[in-house]
């Protein structure tokens, strides 16, 4: 069987980009059991309530829901167990120093397979206030309106 190449996205945390300013991102490997990998290959995961933390110089991922494998037996995993993230020691030290700053948290942004290995993208994030969220939505709407107006003008000009 040929080995997988490329990036296959399993789950994304779209709510995270709406509720937080993402200041820095890191790619980490995950320590998973066999049934977790099989469940992920079926495309089943939920990052919405997940977060990460550094404990005893190790990075851990909490509350990421990977449902039990349907064909699993008594060896099945628990859906919301804490999972170890694989990062370089320098990255863990840097993340830990940054997280000590007030108002920052480490949240999962995307879960994917990269060349056949399960990876997670985590971001150091600062929470947005309500007016920041409204401003972001307003900017997105303005950009959408501008693109519509430009494409309409191009169509009218090309049609003559």
Image: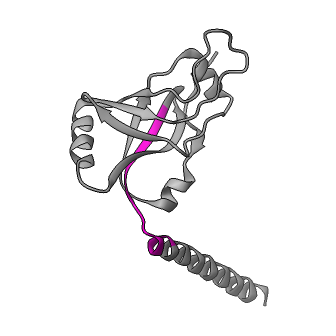
Count of all numbered marks drawn on residues in the image: 0
Furthest toward the right, the residue is 159
Q: Is residue 25 left or right of residue 137?
A: left
- Viewer-proximal residue among 145 and 130: 130
**Residue at image point 24% right, 30% down:** 89
125 is within the stretch colored magenta: yes
Where is the N terminus found, in terms of image quarters? top right
Q: Is residue 115 left or right of residue 29?
A: right
Indicate the position of residue 135 as horizontal and vertical percent values: 48, 76
Q: Which colour scheme is used?
A: one colour
Indicate the position of residue 69 as horizontal and vertical percent values: 67, 21
Indicate the position of residue 26 as horizontal and vertical percent values: 37, 42
**Range covered by the magenta-colored residues:** 119-133
39 is within the stretch colored magenta: no
**Residue at image point 45% right, 28% down:** 82
Furthest toward the top, the residue is 74
- Answer above or below: position of 147 versus 34: below
- Viewer-proximal residue among 7 and 72: 72
**Residue at image point 29% right, 31% down:** 55
Dominant SS type (magenta) = strand
Q: Is residue 62 left or right of residue 54?
A: right
**Residue at image point 72% right, 20% down:** 70
- Answer above or below: position of 98 versus 114: below
- Viewer-proximal residue among 143 and 17: 17
- Viewer-proximal residue among 10 and 57: 57
Q: In this view, does 83 lie to the left or right of 2?
A: left
Indicate the position of residue 11 as horizontal and vertical percent values: 59, 41
């Amino acid at each position: 069987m040929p080995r997988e190449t490329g990036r296959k996205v399993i789950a994304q945390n779209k709510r995270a980009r709406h509720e937080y300013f993402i200041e820095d991102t890191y790619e980490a490997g995950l320590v998973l059991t066999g049934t977790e990998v099989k469940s992920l290959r079926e495309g089943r995961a939920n990052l919405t309530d997940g977060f990460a933390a550094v404990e005893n110089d190790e990075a851990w991922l909490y509350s990421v829901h990977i449902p039990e494998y349907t064909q699993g037996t008594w060896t099945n995993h628990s859906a919301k167990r804490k999972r170890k993230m694989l990062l370089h020691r320098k990255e863990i030290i840097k993340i830990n120093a940054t997280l000590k700053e007030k108002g920052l948290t480490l949240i999962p942004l995307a879960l994917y397979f990269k060349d056949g290995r399960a990876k997670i993208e985590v971001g150091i994030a600062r929470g947005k206030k309500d007016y920041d969220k409204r401003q972001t939505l307003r900017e997105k709407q303005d950009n959408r309106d501008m693109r519509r107006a430009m494409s309409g003008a191009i169509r009218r000009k090309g049609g003559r």
